Image (tube, helix red, strand yellow):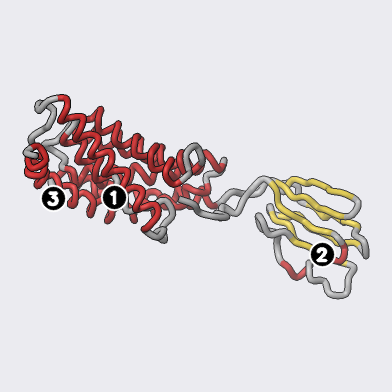
Amino acid sequence: MRSLADTGPGRLAATTAALLALAVVLGYLEAVLVPPLPVPGVKLGLANLAVIVALVRVGAARAAFVSLGRVLLVSLAVGTLGGPAFLLSLGGALAAFVVMWALSLRATSFSPVGWSVAGAAAHVTAQLFVAAALAGSPAPLALLPLSLAASLPFGLALGFLARTVLSRLPELSLSVAGR
Amino acid sequence: MTRGDLLIVIAVAGFALLAVPVAGVALVQPAEGAVFSSPAGETRVALDAPGRYQVAGARGTVTFEVAEGQVRAIAAECPDGLCVNSGVARPGRPIVCAPNGVSAALTGGGAGELDAVSR
């Protein structure tokens, strides 16, 4: 897939900012509009769509900026900054990003669908470990089987969605640049 | 979807299955001791020390038995004997003889049940 990295720093920065904005909006909408799912810790993970697109289009460093910046800004918007929910989000986002970045280095073996599934699994696993550390009890880990199983369909769905978005993104970028 | 993606899907499903024993360990936290409370104060005992303990309450004495890592009330000087019929104490679920002001609760463990879930 074509990267934007060679199209100039201005466009790169603009694309990164647009992806961060997209991640924040998706994360915020999911936080305030989507009702909690029956399995604790499992979310649709819509914001991860922007992170996957960023990994492909603007590189790992800027994708990390999108991922962690999204956690910071959404926490600020919903009023959880610095609290346990923020630490859970941060732990999940960090773990998901590291796993997806590692897989993206083997782009011939793994597609964004695989990154998404692995990222979702890493996200829920890290969140439960952070929850166990915060609670001082291993009890949250009891949710691990259910959370991992639930992360699978969401990771797959988001991965296919990311693949579709990525296949159409070059046209979108050109239309923006043409204005 | 690549073959690598398929392997990831299988691995995540496998980890979910492998995590089932982890969940069991996380939920089962054995209690370490018991505390008998009465108007006179508290008495702490280890669950690995079998024996019978008489706890004087406001209206009579309740006899608890510690055996096989469990605590139960075996006798009470009260007409109803509700505590005797309450079975063994569980983490977070003590045996209580309210009129006597006597109770037996497990310590050092936990039921592993979550009080609340936030996101």
Q: Quadrant of residue A122?
A: top left
Disc on res. A164: 3
Position of B37 compared to A28: left or right? right
Cα distance in 3D space between marks 3 and 1? 14 Å
Tell me which residue sits at (78%, 62%) in the image.
B96
Give SS at disc 2: strand
**Does label 1 lie on the same chain as label 2?**
no
Q: Locate residue B22, reporting x and y percent.
A: 45, 48
Residue B78 in sight here: yes
Q: Are marks 2 and 1 in contact (CB under 8 Å)?
A: no
- How packed mark 1 is, by other alpha carbons closer than 10 Å (few <14, some 14-19, many 20 or more), is many
Cα distance in 3D space between marks 2 and 1? 53 Å
**Does label 1 lie on the same chain as label 3?**
yes
Disc on res. B97: 2
**Does label 3 lie on the same chain as label 2?**
no
Disc on res. A46: 1
Give SS at disc 1: loop
As shown in the figure, which amino acid type bears the numbered disc 2? Cys
